[in-house]
Amino acid sequence: MLKRSVADLRALAHPLRLRMMELFAESPKTTKQVADILGQPPTRLYHHVAALERAGLLVLKEKRKNRGTVEKWYAGISRQIQGTAKKGKGARRAVAATVLEQAKQEMLSRPAGTKEAALLARLVLALPPSKIAAVRKRLFDTIQSLRTEFPSTDDCERWAVTVAFAPVTAPRAPRARRSTNRS
């Protein structure tokens, strides 16, 4: 299980692959369709699709013949990536950095014509240990509910929701300087 999670995380630890997974998770698409949405040439995405498929994060849903070629339709699998052993720490950090960097870019560069303002909020909760799992589940259920209520369609604007739920570490106190009074 842990090896599988680490492989999943490494496959996603690339900004372009993360965006691709988001699009394939919305609905089955071809590599060309994803390339068009991302404004990338399809040839740039083929090796990324292969890496995501090898990691088991994309599945080939169907093949369709189209004008003498075969279109491959892929779908993202729906599962959480987790694992708490130290072996996966570096890979999880890489994915977290990629996700947070993507969110930062989206917050700083609003597409032209966007009428609604973006929303950015931070909340630090004081939770007894017995409530942590319930809050995590509630956040996850909210995300799943939004995904179900607002399925992706081509005629809609794409808005990202990024949620992080992690323990807050206390800031380190600055080191006290040693007094060098020489009398």
Image (tube, rainbow, N blue to C red):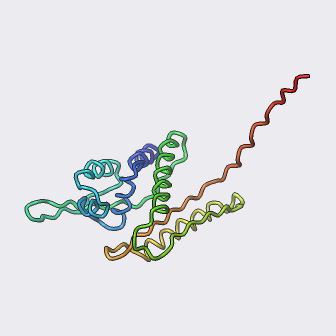
Query: What residue sits 12% from the left and 65% below the top?
Result: 66
Q: Residue at x 38, y 73 (%)?
A: 157
Q: In this rendering, would 87 be left or right of 58?
A: right
Q: How many marks?
A: 0
For residue 96, side relative to residue 132 (left or right)? left
Left or right: 66 in relation to 163: left
Image-quadrant location for residue 57: bottom left
Q: Nearer the viewer, residue 100 or 54?
A: 100
Q: Residue 124, image x and y in percent?
A: 67, 61
Q: Position of residue 56 (x, y in %)?
A: 34, 52
Residue at the limit of the structure toward the front, as seen here: 183
Which residue is located at x 38 percent, y 61 percent? Answer: 22
Percent position of residue 182, x then y: 88, 23
Q: Position of residue 61 (x, y in %)?
A: 25, 62
Q: Residue lying furthest right in this view?
A: 183
Of the pair 147 and 4, the residue shown nearer to us: 147
Q: Residue visible at 65% across and 64% down?
A: 123
Image quadrant holding the C terminus, namely top right
Q: Nearer the viewer, residue 171 or 114?
A: 114
Q: Compared to 14, does 116 lie above or below?
A: below
Q: Residue furthest left?
A: 68
